[in-house]
Amino acid sequence: MGATYKSASKSHVGMVRQVNEDAFLDLPENRLWVVADGMGGHAAGDYVSSLIVDSLRHVPLGRSLDEYTAALRNDLLRINTVVREETANRGVTMMGSTVVVFAARGLRGVCLWAGDSRLYRLRDGVLESISRDHSYVQDLQDSGLLSEADARTHPRSNIVTRAVGVEAQLDVASVELLIAPGDSYLLCSDGLNKTVEDHEIRDVLSHDAPDEIVRSLVHLGLNRGASDNITTLVVKVSS
């Protein structure tokens, strides 16, 4: 059984930052969508996020989703090595980027990620985070030491525990998905979910047109003062 995918994407530098270190890939013809949130500043973060997006764009499709997923994962591991070498060459302390990848074939999907850029799914009115943040505050939440509300305002909420380029070995998390017609998927950088509540994301994501949804979500974040870059990418699935 096949499925039709429609997507739209939008990125904004936010109200405070001078440079947009986010990058995204909206490639419906390959059933591939990516959001990367660069870290390091001084032309470092945007170098890494752009490298991820430009490289994943050219990964061969393969014969199956499993083959494609393996190729995407291997490319992320290769990029990690390239970034580590570039960091040493530039003599800087750190260059890195979070990444979240959504790939699909028919009604099968996969999410790959490292860091705190997220993949959400809206199904039958219920919003669920498919990815789970690799972050200091998520670890505290998992340990029962911090509530979700307090995590948003925690002074160390920007610290991620995994990202491309940060460690010698990149540990890419993955989840396999069974996709249903009617599903909506949202990939976003943390600039969105740190300014917009989950119930607001759910309400906006329930609308029909992906391009209107991404504009509305970015607008919501900007209205809250968006201290970080905001990137949103929405994928709608129909039969």
Image (cartoon, rainbow, N blue to C red):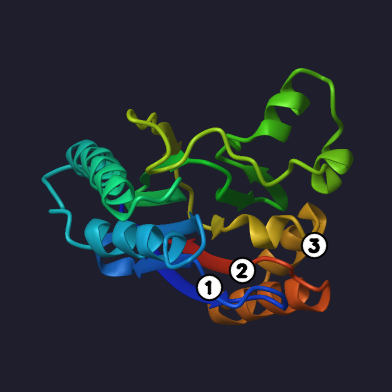
**Residue type indicated by callout 2:** Asn
Residue neighbourhood size for the residue with mark 1, other residues' Cα within 10 Å, grouped as few (<14), some (14–19), many (≥20): many
Decide: few, some or many residues near mark 2? Use Cα within 10 Å; few <14, some 14-19, many ≥20.
many
Check the image and report above or below for 42 versus 209. above
Position of the C terminus by quadrant: bottom left
Residue 200: give its label: 3
SS type, badge 2: loop
x 45%, y 71%: residue: 7
Of marks 1 and 3, the one in the foreground: 1
Figure quadrant of residue 165: top left
- Give the spatial CA distance, label 1 vs label 2: 6 Å
Labelled pair 1, 2 in contact (Cβ < 8 Å): yes
Residue named by callout 2: 229
Tell me the number on the disc at residue 20.
Answer: 1
Counting residues from the N terminus, which is met first, the one under dot 1 or under dot 2?
A: 1
Tell me the amino acid under the disc marked 3. Answer: Glu
The quadrant holding residue 31 is bottom left
Instruction: Judge from the rendering whether residue 155 lies leftward or rightward of residue 71; answer left or right.
Output: right
